[in-house]
Image (tube, rainbow, N blue to C red):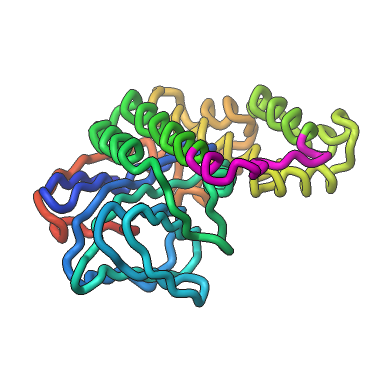
Amino acid sequence: MKHTTALCKSSRFRCLEDLQKESVELCLTYCGYEECDSGHRFGPNRRSSYVLHIVMSGKGTLEIGKKTYELGVGDAFLISPDTEAWYQADWDDPWSYMWVGFTGIKADECAMNAGFSLKSPVRKIECMEELYRYIDDMIDAHQLSFADELKRNGVLMLFFSVLIDDYKKQEPGIVLSRPYPGSVYVKHAMEYITHNYDKRIKINELADDIGVNRSYLTSSFKKAIGCSPQEYLVNLRMEKAKSMLKKTDQPVNSVAQAVGYTDQLAFSKIFKQYYGMSPRAYREQEEELVIYDKKGDYTSSDI
């Protein structure tokens, strides 16, 4: 079994796609930019991750959420997971745009703080040149190495920090990541889970230790990061397990124990539910970087 990541470096289409999803918090899945042909249309389709486009030149049309937007230079639009959308380049003045695809527990929070939501998927930006340089940096870090993986996701965080600062400048009165009464409990629970994911954790006992009931902690978690404490725990365990399977020679049962599972069969079942293959198959999976010369030479699952 082989996982293929692709890199295209043509003059009108530069793209890094089908990256392995390695980070549970915020992870780059693909990025690039394109000078589109007249009338070039994509969709309608639904994506498994977020994708943010930024129009660099020309014009085009976006249809999303039963609304149609006429877009031009400096407009950015976000398509959320499982949201149907299509977009098309203008026939007379076709657009060029750059994009980043991303996923993770903090993906929704990053999008919201950068000024995007399901109800408001479009806004103007004033930091295009800086964002363009960051996308270039992501593409340049295309090697299938741990160092480049860290670099890509680190640059993605810088990308969003610039977008968030840009939004605050345009909306100086906006309050981002509004605190609410349960946020302090979420922070405490996340810190505890992060440092104890390898141990037996019962969410109701964790809630009791913090001083709230389980339902309140769960609802607070979902407001803060979009998932329950149990989902956060399992996501973290699976991320750690993937890293250990690729970067160590420890047997599968040792990996299972290291991430908090005393039953290897239970661990393998959950791992397969997450990644579509067994831990052993994932460890044996080859990774390949395919470099191609022009758009169309490689078929991606999401672009």
Residue at x 17% of width, y 66% of height = 37
Instruction: Locate residue 154: give its quadrant.
Output: top left
Q: Is residue 176 magenta?
A: yes
Q: Is residue 105 visible?
A: no
| Farthest residue, direction bottom | 66
Q: Which is nearer the eye, 192 or 97?
A: 97
Q: Which is nearer the eye, 230 or 107?
A: 107
Q: Which is nearer the eye, 198 or 118?
A: 118
Bounds of the magenta segment: 166-183
- Give the quarter of the figure containing the C terminus: bottom left
Q: Is residue 240 visible?
A: yes
Q: Main secondary structure of the magenta part?
A: loop
Reply above or below: 302 against 206.
Answer: below
Q: Which is nearer the eye, 63 or 19?
A: 63
The percent coordinates of residue 82 (x first, y second) are 50, 64
Instruction: Locate residue 127: give its quadrant.
Output: top left
Left or right position of 196 against 30 = right
The percent coordinates of residue 14 (x first, y second) are 20, 47
Instruction: Locate residue 131: give its quadrant.
Output: top left
Residue at x 85% of width, y 30% of height = 210
Reply above or below: 100 against 79.
Answer: above
The percent coordinates of residue 212 (x first, y second) are 89, 37
The percent coordinates of residue 21 (x first, y second) are 42, 42
Q: How many marks?
A: 0
Q: Is residue 245 magenta?
A: no
Residue at x 71% of width, y 42% of height = 178
